Amino acid sequence: MARAQYKIFLADYLNPLNDKTCSWVRQGALVARLRSDGSYKWCFIGKEKEALALYGQKPDIEVCEFPGGIISPGFYDMHFHWVQDEVRTMPKDSLLKWLSEYTWPHEAKFKSLDFTKKKAKTFSNDLLKAGTIGGACYASIHGHSVDWALKEFKGDYIVGNVLMTMNSPKYLTQTKSQALKLIKSKSNKYLKKYAMTPRFAPTTHPEVMTEGSQVAKKNKSFIQTHLSETKNEINYVLGLYKEHKGFEKVKSYTEIYKKCGLLGPRTIMGHGIHLSKDELTMLSKSKTAVAHCPTSNAPVKDLGLGSGLFDFKKVEKAGVRWALATDIGGGPFLSMLDVIKSFVTQNKTKKVSGATYTKALYRATQAGAELLQLSKTRGNFQKNKLAHFIILEKPSLKKEDKAEDVLKRMLRGNRENLGELVSQTFLNGESVYQNN
């Protein structure tokens, strides 16, 4: 069947432009044009009346209307473990206890190729259902958990197998040579779609991180790991590394990663809650980014790990790039809408100003695309960007509402699964998920 030369999408829409500005257009229109490479890219962003005047008489058009919906960019989840989906609601009184008692035994199941293939297919659909169209993903130690994630996930993802060569359960431990062989194999194959992924400093020999980061940088692969999630973790890491030759004098968690060559513009650190001024300077100078995971860091009563509040103001003042993430399964919710709400609620509870829904939407969309180095063609609605978007359920609105009011109305109340607000997900102008 021939594809239409133009596709016109009619609905109210939200367009996050920066931390303080989100366009809110009633009776809006987004028009996508079919390009020679088969992609649909935006050629018009504005009002319905003007779009129909300009494009309505074209001989080859398809018009899609969403009267009960709001068009928004799709979400980028910049730190999640697809192999932890089934442990996200397990007890989390202690990070290290949660890992050893629930997470690691479940990840061991991914040794089975059949189990991995089945889970990748169902989880891929779950991502689309949540309106997530890209992000930074952790797999298990098994190479095929990377292969199947990249094969099944629709959108733009970087994926890496976690590296566990020390201080790990026997059933989830690699030798140093096995880990390095896997890094070289996947980085050479997937290049920019691969992420060299030490689980965190305590589970990965420094020589593996050092050699692995060299391979990743040579292939322009990404690097991702965890940093300063809890104070207990930091003390544990520093105690361990003072016993490693060449690391006896390290003063911070970030310095360990710096010595191993992990920092850089394609590196994403998960959490980064308890960072010193010197550590923030290291991250800023190296252009290393941080993925902030509000629902995972939330109090235990809210199904999080109780790690603490991310000081986004301090991070921004230091010039460190950051975006939002779910941290499935430390985080209990796969929907970035829950993450947006949690970011606003936690900061409001602590009386921190500036944590708006507008800012959170930007950090869940365009900022994530920027961390993936895809912001020229993805992340929000601008001419010549790809026609990626989602349809959200429209709340009751007032004529004078602005973007902040719309988001607040959409996310208020105690709805258990905010992901249900996503009614459709579109990639390249085509519907890839529809809530029936």
Image: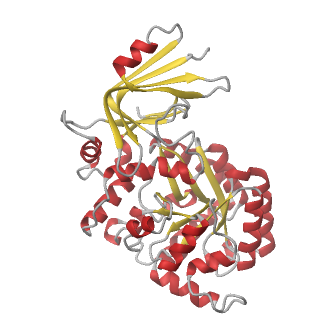
- Residue 254 versus residue 194 in the image, above or below: below
- For the residue pair 234 and 101, the one nearer the viewer reads as 234
Q: In the rendered image, which quarter contains the C terminus?
A: top left
Q: How is the image coloured?
A: secondary structure
Q: Quadrant of residue 422?
A: top left
Residue 160's spot in the image, x, y percent? 66, 59
- Side (left or right) of 162 relative to 354: right
The quadrant the N terminus occupies is top right
* Residue drawn where x is 41% and y is 71% of the image: 305
Q: What residue appears at the point 54 percent right and 68 percent down from the top-left corner?
A: 284
Horizontally, residue 92 falls left or right of residue 413, namely right
Front one among 5 and 342: 5
**The image quarter in which residue 218 lies:** bottom right
Identify the residue at horizontal 54%, vertical 86% (top origin): 236
Is residue 339 left or right of 249 when viewed as pictured? left
**How many numbered dots are placed on residues in this image?**
0
Where residue 342 sits in the image (x, y, percent)? 34, 59
Q: Is residue 304 visible?
A: no
Q: Is residue 210 left or right of residue 303?
A: right
Locate residue 429, reporting x and y percent: 53, 28
Q: In the image, is residue 249 above or below residue 137?
A: below
Quick check: can you spot residue 395? Answer: yes
Q: Position of residue 11 (x, y in %)?
A: 35, 27
Instruction: Please say if 196 is above or below 27.
Output: below
Q: Is residue 130 above or below residue 140?
A: above
